[in-house]
Image (tube, rainbow, N blue to C red):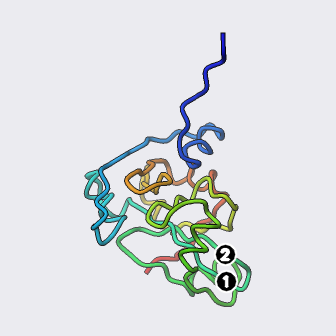
Amino acid sequence: MAKQKAAAGTPATVALTALGLPFAAHPYEHDPSAPSFGLEAAEALGVEPDRVFKTLLADTDLGLVVGVVPVTGMLDLKALAAAVGAKRAAMADPAVAERRTGYVVGGISPIGQKTRHVTVVDETAQLFDTVFVSGGKRGFDIELSPADLLTATDASYAPIAK
């Protein structure tokens, strides 16, 4: 008898499963006209927006860096640069972000990226038992503990949101 292959997930869910980290998958109907992917996710999933985090890539003098911040705020580029010991940071070109992560903008997950990047999670994630991040495509979020998010991404906490 042929061995059954497990159903394929996104690179993020595959990575979490391989690491043995618990998570909950939360698919929702994505509206292409939504002005904010993150706020759309919070509303569709019925969770407080402060618990939903967006994944942003910044270009620093040390290379690309991932910042994970609440969808209710913005990434503080100076704080992100300081957190990783860089002199400067600017938002990465969306095409570069897609190519380097393997995800599309609006669905970039901090977990399971094509190229591993230095990752910093805003310290406010620690205020919650679980947080939501993109699961690797638009209309799909993953809920997990902030500690497991750090483990999965080898990240650190810093005050990087404003």
Q: Does residue 10 sit above or below 33 in this rendering?
A: above
Of residues 145 and 31, the one drawn nearer to the viewer in this rendering? 31
Residue lying at 60% horizontally and 38% vertically, measured from the top left: 17
Question: Cβ–Cβ below 8 Å for labels 2 and 1?
Answer: yes
Residue lying at 50% horizontally and 66% vertically, measured from the top left: 55
Name the quadrant of the N terminus: top right
- Indicate the amino acid at tag 2: Leu
Of residues 55 and 96, the one drawn nearer to the viewer in this rendering? 96
Q: Does residue 75 sit above or below 106 in this rendering?
A: below
- Indicate the amino acid at tag 1: Thr
Residue lying at 59% horizontally and 43% vertically, measured from the top left: 16
Specify whether 98 is left or right of 138. right
Whole-percent x and y of residue 147?
A: 56, 52
What residue would you read off at disc 2? 64
Whole-percent x and y of residue 80?
A: 59, 79
Name the disc covering residue 60, or none. Answer: 1
Q: Residues within 10 Å of mark 1 (few under 14, many from 20)?
A: many
Can you name the residue that lies furthest to the right here? Answer: 62
Toward which corner of the image does residue 67 lie, by quadrant? bottom right
Q: Residues within 10 Å of mark 2 (few under 14, many from 20)?
A: many
Q: Does residue 56 sit above or below 92 in this rendering?
A: above
Specify whether 155 is left or right of 94. right
Q: Secondary structure at mark 2?
A: strand
Q: CA distance from mark 2 to mark 1?
A: 6 Å
Name the disc covering residue 118, or none. Answer: none
Name the quadrant of the C terminus: bottom left
Whole-percent x and y of residue 65?
A: 64, 73
